[in-house]
Amino acid sequence: MKTKFARIYLVRHGNVVNKKKIIYGYLPVPLSPTGKREAKRAGLFLKKQNIAAIFSSPQKRTQQTARIINQVISKGRLKITTDKKLRETGYGRLMQGLTEEEVAKKHPKERWLYFRQPAKLKKGETLAKMAERMLNVIQKGIKKYPGQNLVFVSHRDPILAVLLKTSKRSFNDLHKVKHFCSTGSVLEVDFIGRRLVNKNF
């Protein structure tokens, strides 16, 4: 029996307009001109990857990124499915609208855990739960489009949670690997048989 194979591309949204340097969480911040260029570059790479469908977080910045990618790779013909399980982190929502300095004053314990022992952070949402919901969407996409390459547009921490989980690494490594997921990044995970294989670290 032939082994099933597909490529899954996890795309972080492009850079956003954020003049006040706040944690934007679920706020409807738009892509900046730089972010639009990043999304276009991601699209130019993905254009060569024979993409069957695009899935996106409901946040404005991911929706914009998904639409730009879709325009580049298919002139807007591919279906974009919005799924709330690809959303930003619960921590981001909890802290949205605050600067890092304000978070340090109002939520010192949570901020310390997030940067030092993120696996233990429970307020808002655990990284384990984040990985679980992301993997649920990915598996549903694979089932709907068997053997086909797919794009999932999401946010840094949810994407990294998936990669850490599939690599069997500790969620405490979140900040050790964050450089892999800058704005506009495209990260590849291969689906081989019934297993997701992280190709990034």
Image (spheres, rainbow, N blue to C red):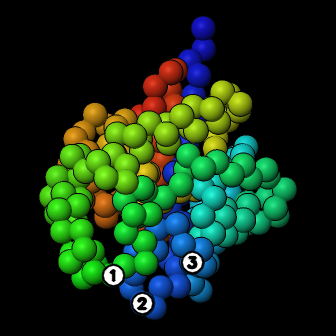
Q: Residue at x 56, y 18 (%)?
A: 3
Q: Amino acid at mark 1?
A: Thr
Mark seen at residue 37: none
User: Which quarter of the figure is the N terminus placed in?
Assistant: top right
Is residue 129 among the parts visible in the rendering?
A: yes
Mark 2 and mark 3 lie on one chain; the one further toward the N terminus is: 2
Name the residue beneath numbered marker 1. Answer: 99
Q: Could you say where residue 42 lies in the image, as x and y percent from the top left?
A: 58, 65
Against 110, is 138 above or below?
A: above
Q: Residue at x 63, y 58 (%)?
A: 58
Mark 2 residue element: loop
Whole-percent x and y of residue 20? 42, 90
The local secondary structure at tag 3 comes to loop
Residue, x 53% and y 85% (percent of image)?
17
Front position among marks 1 and 3 = 1
Gap between marks 2 and 3, in whole Å?
12 Å
Q: Amino acid at mark 2?
A: Lys
Q: Is residue 161 left or right of residue 66?
A: left
Q: How many marks?
A: 3
Residue 73 or residue 95, whichever sits in front: 95
Q: Tell me the residue that label 2 is attached to.
A: 20
The label shown at residue 29 is 3
Q: Position of residue 48 (x, y in %)?
A: 66, 54
